[in-house]
Image (cartoon, rainbow, N blue to C red):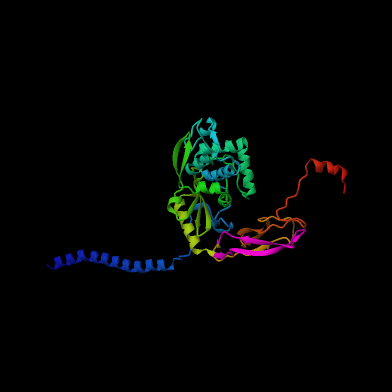
Amino acid sequence: MRGQRTEKKAHRHPLRRWLGALLAAAVLWVPAAWAAEQTADPDAPPAVEAQAFVLMSAQTGQVFLEGNMHQQLPMASTTKIMTALLAVENGSLDTVYTMRKEDVTVEGSSLGVREGDQLTLRDLITGMMLKSGNDAARSVAHIVGGDGFVDMMNQRAAQLGMRNTHFTNPAGLPDDDHYSTAYDMALLAKAALQNPDFAAICASSTAAITVNGDTWHLKNSNRLLRELDGACGIKTGFTKKAGRCLVSAVTREGSTLICVTLNCGEDWKTHTALYDYAFATGSTQQLPPEEKSSLPVVGGSKDSVQITVQSDLDFLLLKEGSSLQKTVQLPGFIYAPITAGQVVGEVVYRSPDGGEYRLPVTATEEVPEKGKKTGDKKKTGGIFDWIKGWFVKD
């Protein structure tokens, strides 16, 4: 009997030890988990697993967050932002064009147009941006610039300050000499969003285009337009070499931010987290709705002209803890004649880290030359004035 009791005790002993260890672990785990939750910084920026990224203000160009933003990398189909910008700046958007075989037979993603298909340049751009059609990109390039389109791309990049960018094709197909940076792509997006035609196309979650008189319904590959509050563009991209690339924009309460990630496997999640962080933690600087003053006039019917500066924004969203310094750039005087709405100067808001927001200063009234009335136009000579000029000398 004693042996049996000893045997039972021996069987119970490991179980007790196991239960004791489990209880101790639970007791230790609860405070540890609580401590981790308490010490986590709710205002810390989100982790970003991208080869390069940048979060920038579309209004000021100020960089909120970045990682390797000047590293030259392939950018895949986000290239088409430049193709679309050049098209809306230089093309006849509502003119119907006929597709060529050499443009529509191209590798990669496709809108699905064929040789002989007819559609407007606007619809081609829409198909290129929403469906990332390489056939559409090649067709747009031929229509707008022919064989010189790539040169146009690189020239425009230089104008925009994209110093670490070089284009070799309009679609973003892999090429060792075709590259950009997260920062440069943000500069491109900033400029492109200022064009109303471009902005309307890239903000479309869905669109209908007309091909040979038939309606095609397109869905934008940019999921953020359907999933993220305030999303207003811009372009997705992917190749095996470049990885997942995304250029996006979000507007909330009048402020627009641009996010670029290059080679980021979790791009949707990353962009969402970065926007939510920046809008939640950013500083704001109020802008006066209107400021009025006057400027001396030389040779005019009046000695001065009323001027004003107006902003469409109530405030600017800035990187946390930063502010902008205001500078008014005006001449000491202005010569008549002056027209209402004429730009006579500008107000510039600048931050130490390079952010900048410019507003034009305009005349609110017309000031004719001295001795002339408002609305008078200088007479241009007819045949009699021309003949008179031969006989009347100063």
Residue 291, magenta (yes or no): yes
**On screen, 137 above or below 21?**
above
- Residue found at x 72% / y 52%: 376
Report the predominant secondary structure element of the magenta stretch: strand
168 with respect to 366 (left or right): left
The one of 59 and 185 positioned closer to us in this rendering: 59
Asked whether residue 84 is in view, the answer is: yes
Estimate the x, y position of residue 95 in percent, counting from the top left: 56, 37
Q: At x 47% / y 55%, what residue is drawn?
A: 230
The picture quadrant where one finds residue 97 is top right
Q: Looking at the image, which is closer to me, 140 or 16?
A: 140
Count of numbered marks: 0
Magenta stretch contains residue 371: no
Identify whether 142 is placed above or below 275: above
Tell me: 374 left or right of 199: right
Quadrant containing the N terminus in the rendered view: bottom left
Can residue 110 be spotted in the picture? no
The magenta segment is 284-313
Residue 180, relative to residue 336: is it above or below? above
121 and 7: which one is in front?
121
Q: Position of residue 255 (x, y in %)?
A: 53, 58
Identify the residue shown where x is 20% and y is 65%: 12
Which x, y percent locates residue 372?
A: 75, 55
Q: Nearer the viewer, residue 308 or 303?
A: 303
The residue furthest left is 1
